[in-house]
Image (cartoon, rainbow, N blue to C red):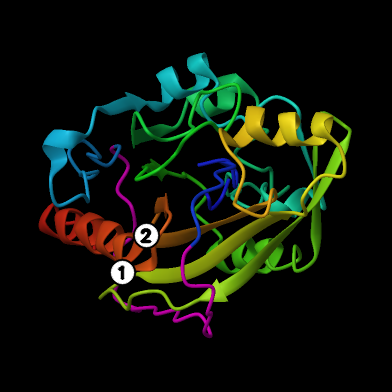
Amino acid sequence: MAAGAVAAMLVFTVGCADTGSAAPETTVDAGTPATSAAPADLKGLLTNPHEDPSQDEVLEFDFAQVAEKNLLAPPKGMAFTPDACVNYVTTGDAAGTPLQTAPAATIAGFNGRMQFNAASPVGKDHNLGHDNFFAQFVVELPEGPKLADMHKAALECSDGDITLDGKLAGKLTNVDHAAPALAGAETVGLVQRIIFAPPKDPAGTEILKRFYGSVDPDGGIDRIKHIVMVVLGDVFYYGIVSDAPTATKMAENFHRLATARGLA
């Protein structure tokens, strides 16, 4: 992410969690200040949400490095229909260009930072492992994040399709999930779920194992991730993780640090 994709935009597929969903909780404070001409200071706004951070190897990059390392790209061999299943985060321009598919020069030019732990599938050829993973980024979008448009686009994937290696077909869905109400901010929460039925042949099982590391006891795949998006003026935050409480904690941590820095 997830959402999912991480990549949702980042396509992350993670261990099962509570699949219940609720109406999104979007909050707006009319007092949000306009972004100044100077770039916002985004360093230190992304923090490890785990109770015991000593167990994590955490990596963080600015957006020039994100572009160079192609960290927003989905794993090779994964395809999605409709495109909005994963490409719903946009750069804020009038064309609604998805951030994930924007030219590298465009991504590199943004004031942004991305953080994830080694358990995350970010930057890997396949979504191997990702137990106890988290990933998040914050970016300043000069033309302003259009959160309502991103939310609408993500929900266009209410019955999406995912294909691995052009051979194995599964289902991908985005649904609303309650997001924390944060003063001076807009917030949206999503749950992204990917399901593959147990393959009918060993070759299909090997494809699933290559992408997901292992299969579920029934031989298929059922993976859920929680996604939270926060907007403060022209600053956009995106977090993705397997469980809802940690997603909320990530958003609250960002908001607390950003507010202390005067971004809200």
Of 131 and 201, the residue lying toward us:
201
Q: Which residues are magenta?
A: 17-38
Q: Which residue, given by chain and number where applicable, does mark 1 sit on?
A: 32
- Disc 2 and disc 1: Cα gap in Å? 6 Å
Label 2 amino acid? Gly
- In contact (CB < 8 Å): disc 2 and disc 1: yes
The 10 Å Cα crowd at callout 2, few under 14, some 14 to 19, many 20 or more, is many
Q: Residue at x 60, y 52 (%)?
A: 217
> Residue 136's spot in the image, x, y percent?
38, 44
The 10 Å Cα crowd at callout 1, few under 14, some 14 to 19, many 20 or more, is some
Residue 193 visible, this orientation: yes
Quadrant containing the C terminus is bottom left
Of 26 and 232, the residue lying toward us:
26
> Residue 239's spot in the image, x, y percent?
40, 52
Label 1 amino acid? Thr
Q: Is residue 124 magenta?
A: no
Q: Based on the displayed image, in which of its 4 quarters is residue 214 positioned?
A: top right
In the image: residue 185, left or right of residue 256? right
Q: Which residue, given by chain and number where applicable, does mark 2 sit on?
A: 233
- Among numbered discs 2 and 1, the one appearing first in the sequence: 1
Q: Residue at x 77, y 50 (%)?
A: 198
Judged from the image, the secondary structure of the residue bearing numbered disc 2 is loop
Judged from the image, the secondary structure of the residue bearing numbered disc 1 is loop
Q: Is residue 32 magenta?
A: yes
Q: How many marks?
A: 2
> Residue 144's spot in the image, x, y percent?
49, 53
